[in-house]
Each structure stands twice: as structure tokens, then as C-alpha cells.
Image: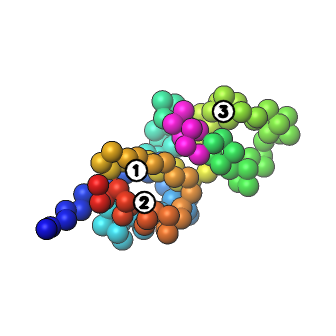
Amino acid sequence: MMVTMKTPHITLYGITNCDTVKKARAWLTDQGLEYAFHDFKKQGVPAERLPDWLAAAGWQKLVNRQGTTWRKLDPGAQAAVQDDASASALMQAQPSIIKRPVVEWQGGQHSAITVGFDAAQWQALQETLSSE
């Protein structure tokens, strides 16, 4: 019996000059995986996708509180981010605040959303989605 590998549909969201996004894109290319790239700087944050990202990862993971953009916010603006709605508003106003990359994976009956780059996690996910 021959097992056919299906390529998952992958959309990577980020900014082109981010080192982590560069590593993630190189990893996908090295794996021979095709993907769509959505540049926050040029295309903005897709507001219709934020609810799914928040549901999958939570605002605490999506908002990069270690980054320069967060540190430049005044303490009042930082303190105002307390839930999905306030985090969503901040992410739309300041796309650089989003931990990158955000990747949407779809294959067969399953889909996943990952935040950040973790080669081992991505490899396992890609294998799971390709076998469906």
C-alpha cells in the first residue's frame, strides 16, 4: 500500500526583517514546504483572523511583552492590555507587538495555529497534517 503525503496549506504571518521570521521561512523552504507569506507591515493585521489566533494561543502568548514595541509603550498603555479585546485592539494598532511568526497550518480535517518558531513542534505538526 502506498501512502501519499499531502502538503499542508501554510500561511506565515510576520514582518520580513524579523530574524525569527527569517529562520521560520528558511526552515519551511528547507523542508520543501510551500507557504503564503502575509507581511504585517505591508498588508496589516488581518482582523478577521485575530479571534482564531486568540482562541488558539491566548493574548498572553500573542502579545510580545519582551519586544521593543512593548517596552516603548507607556505604563498606562501596557496596563490597559488585560483581555482579548484590549490585546486585539493593540495588535491592530501596533502590528510589531505581535510575537512572530504566527503560522496557520491546515491539512485534512485538522488545523493548527502556532506562535513563534519551534522547529521540533513544526516538524511534528507537519508530519501529522501531511499524513491525513
According to the image, label 3 marks what residue? 84
Q: Work out how far the residue at label 2 is from the one at label 3, CA to CA, in angstroms.
A: 26 Å
Question: Measured along the vertical axis of the image, is residue 128 above or below residue 62?
Answer: below
53 within the magenta span: yes
Q: Which residue type does callout 2 highlight?
A: Leu
Residue identifier under label 2: 125
Q: Which residues are magenta?
A: 51-57
Residue at the disc numbered 1: 105
Q: Is there a contact, CB below 8 Å, between mark 2 and mark 1?
A: yes
Residue 104: % across, % down? 43, 47
Q: Which of the two residues, 20 or 61, is positioned nearer the viewer here?
A: 61
**What is the x, y in percent for residue 13?**
47, 48
Determine the secondary structure under disc 1.
Answer: strand
Badge 3 amino acid: Asp
Q: Can residue 127 be seen?
A: yes
The picture quadrant where one finds residue 20 is bottom right
Magenta-drawn stretch, dominant element (helix, strand or loop): helix
Residue depicted at 58% across the width and 38% down the height: 54
- The residue drawn where x is 35% and y is 69% is 31
